[in-house]
Amino acid sequence: MRIAVFSSKPYDREFLGQANKQHNHELVFYEPRLNRDTYTLAAGFEGVCVFVHDELDAGVLIRLANQGTKLIALRSAGFNNVDLVAAEDLNLSVVRVPAYSPYAVAEHTVGLMLALNRRFHRAYNRVREGNFSLDGLLGFDLRGKTIGIIGTGKIGRVVMQILKGFDCNLLAYDPYPHPEAEALGTYVDLRQLFAESDIITLHCPLTPETYHIIDAQSMARMKEGVMLINTSRGALIDTNAAIEAIKDGQIGYLGLDVYEEEDDLFFEDLSNKVIKDDVFSRLLTFPNVLVTGHQAFFTENALQNIAETTLQNITEFAETGTCKNLVTSDRIKK
Ligand code: NAD
């Protein structure tokens, strides 16, 4: 198939190019994101291959369908950037990479917990300046702490496995409990998870139901000084409410790999530009906030798996007209 690959970075070209040796599709790489300004780049392509910041709203999907596109191949597990109902109405098939390395994201999640707790981000700078004072670097033992995991899918369960090794007590919330998670921890309702957890980590997808699942009300129910980690999707947390909760000490630590308005920031080098997002800039002023720019997935293993599954999805669709990794609109409710 002829595929227009949007949002492509050098590492996408490398890993997709390598995986395509087994498939021989015609891949044309475009650096821009797919949106209402760039969709014409896909004219004449049967498929588009996209990532998390490409904007596949109804307007873009209608234009793509009119240009002859049949397949949307996501290089991600999340699909909140695609209007799945519109895609179905237009007979556009959407495929994704359901699992590429839950370990990559889970390990990064635990990395954020450790860094925030033991203040690696501050210690790194201090030591380089010859300041070996320990003031302000006091941490706590993870052993025996209660960790609340919201979403016990593939990533949430690996987080639970890792934290079991630290001898933590694990509480979990998921509308669809999983036996593996049941063996590692205890399912409770959200209210109990908020009330009892020392650390809360988010591993559910972004859906209308989970939008701002962490807001002022839920933060008020948490333990004072709680650590909150989000490596899932930015809009799970009401960022303005989180800033207020950090200011009054209700949130003691915040670790983010994702941010509500990250589309205008992440994946680009903006070091010579003025950041105009005042909410994001405020976050960066806090000593107890650590932000990474949507890099949790970014391991060699994950990129290789993403590339191989994406090419396999395209081949399967080309040969059969469908794909086992098809995403349908009923998934939004899950
Ligand atoms: P998954 O589909 O295996 O698991 C998601 C889990 O969330 C499921 O068990 C589901 O039942 C549960 N869930 C659904 N609604 C819920 C709700 N209201 N409350 C609690 N749980 C709910 O997905 P996964 O592979 O574990 O990925 C989880 C999320 O991680 C993805 O949706 C994606 O947004 C994010 N992600 C981030 C990165 C990154 O680089 N930061 C990379 C990959 C995935």
Image (tube, helix red, strand yellow):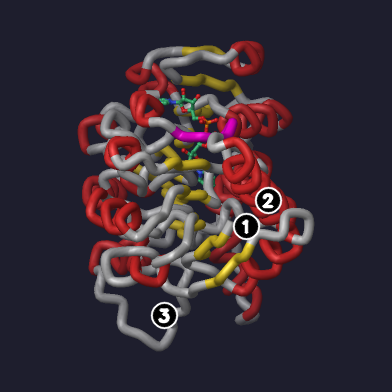
Alpha carbon distance from label 1 to label 2: 7 Å
- Which residue does the numbered mark 3 point to in the structure image? 270
- In this view, 32 is above or below 129: above
Question: Residue 302 got which mark?
Answer: 2
Label 3 residue SS: loop
Query: Residue 82 placed where, x, y %?
Result: 35, 46
Of residues 315 and 259, the one drawn nearer to the viewer in this rendering = 315
Q: Residue at x 31, y 40 (%)?
A: 250
Residue type marked 3: Leu
Alpha carbon distance from label 3 to label 2: 25 Å
Residue 216 is drawn in which quadrant? Answer: top left
Q: Residues within 10 Å of mark 1 (few under 14, many from 20)?
A: few
Query: Which of the image's four quarters has the C terminus?
Result: top left
CB within 8 Å, label 3 to label 1: no
Q: Is residue 219 left or right of residue 92?
A: left
- Which residue does the numbered mark 1 point to in the structure image? 298
What span is colored magenta in the figure?
323-327
Residue type marked 2: Ala
